[in-house]
Amino acid sequence: MEANDQHIVIIFKDLDKLTFLAAPALSLASHLKKGITFLYISEKSDEKTNHAFIQALEKLFQGNLSGMKAHIIPQLNEALVKILPDKFGGVMVLLEADEQAGKKSIWAKPQLMKLFRHSRLPYMLVRNEDTIHAQFQSVVLAMDSLKESKEKVLWTSYFGRFFGAKITVVTRIYKDEFLARQAKNNEQFVRKIFDSFDLQYEIQTFVDKIPELDLFAVDYAAKIGADLVIAMTTKNISIFDLFTGLPENKVALNPQKMPVLFLNSRDDLYVLCD
C-alpha cells in the first residue's frame, strides 16, 4: 500500500466531538505523512445528515479537506474493525469514547476495548476530558518480561523518529531468574532499536513490586508530564482476568486522563515501516 493511501482513521458518533478528535489526528497525519479518514457512525445517511457532516468538516478545517476522506457508516461492529486496514487504508485508529454512555453501550471504553481486542491496527480511545498534547513530545513505554512486549518497541520508535519525542522506558527488577533474563533481553532489544535510530531515550528501573506495569507507567507518565503511553493488551486471557478485570481496561479508564495507544499482540500487527 502506497503512503498516500494510508490513513489515520477517526471513528465517532457525535459531530460536536470532531474538534476534540481532530487535533491529535492532524498531528499524527502530518508527522507520519498519512491522510485522514473520518467514519461518522450514524443510522441516518440521508441528505440532511450528509450535509451536516460535510459542513462540520469544512467549518473545522476552513474548507481545506485535502488528503481527507469521509464516510457515514451505519454501525460500529466487528465487521467494520476487520476491514479498516484494507477498505479504508487504516494505519491507526482514534475512537470517540463516551464517558456518559452506559456500561453496555458500544461507546463505553470497556466495550470499545473488547471490540478492538483483535484489531491489527493500534488504537487510541479519546474522552472529552482527556488531556491530549497533540505534538507527542514525551512518550512512556512499559517493558516487562513478556516476549510480546517487544512489539511495542517499533511503534514507540515512530514517535521518536517522526515527532522527535523523548522516550522514557519503565521497567522493573525481577527476582525470578527466568523472568529477569527475559526482561534483560527485552531491555537489550529496546537499546538496539532505539540506538539504531539515534533516538533520545532513558530507561527507568524500579525495585518495588509492580504487578501491572502498564498501569504503573500511566501513573509515572502523569507525574513527569508525558503526552502518551504505549500499552499492550493481554494476549492470553485467564479465568483470573475474567474475575478481576483485564489490566488494559484499567489503563483505558485511568483517572489521570492520560492518552494511551493500545496494541494487540498478534503476528500481523500493522507496522508503518521498519
Image: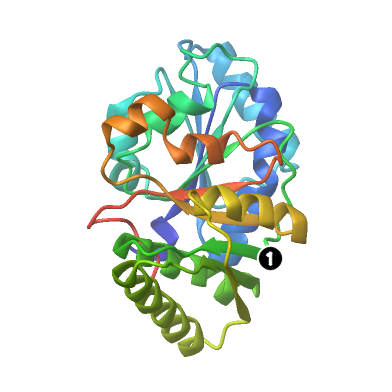
Is residue 32 shown above or below 133? Answer: below
How many tags in the picture? 1
The residue drawn where x is 30% and y is 28% is: 78
Q: Could you say where residue 7 lies in the image, as x and y percent from the top left?
A: 46, 51
Q: As rendered, which of 26 and 216 lies closer to the eye?
A: 216
The residue drawn where x is 71% and y is 59% is: 226
Q: Could you say where residue 160 lies in the image, as x and y percent from the top left?
A: 58, 74
Q: Quadrant of residue 3?
A: bottom left
| The C terminus lies in quadrant | bottom left
Residue 4 in the figure: left or right of residue 23: left
Residue 27 in view of the camera: yes
Q: Which residue is mark 1?
A: 138
| The N terminus lies in quadrant | bottom left
Is residue 42 shown above or below 268? Answer: above
Q: Quadrant of residue 2?
A: bottom left
Q: Could you say where residue 32 lies in the image, as x and y percent from the top left?
A: 54, 65
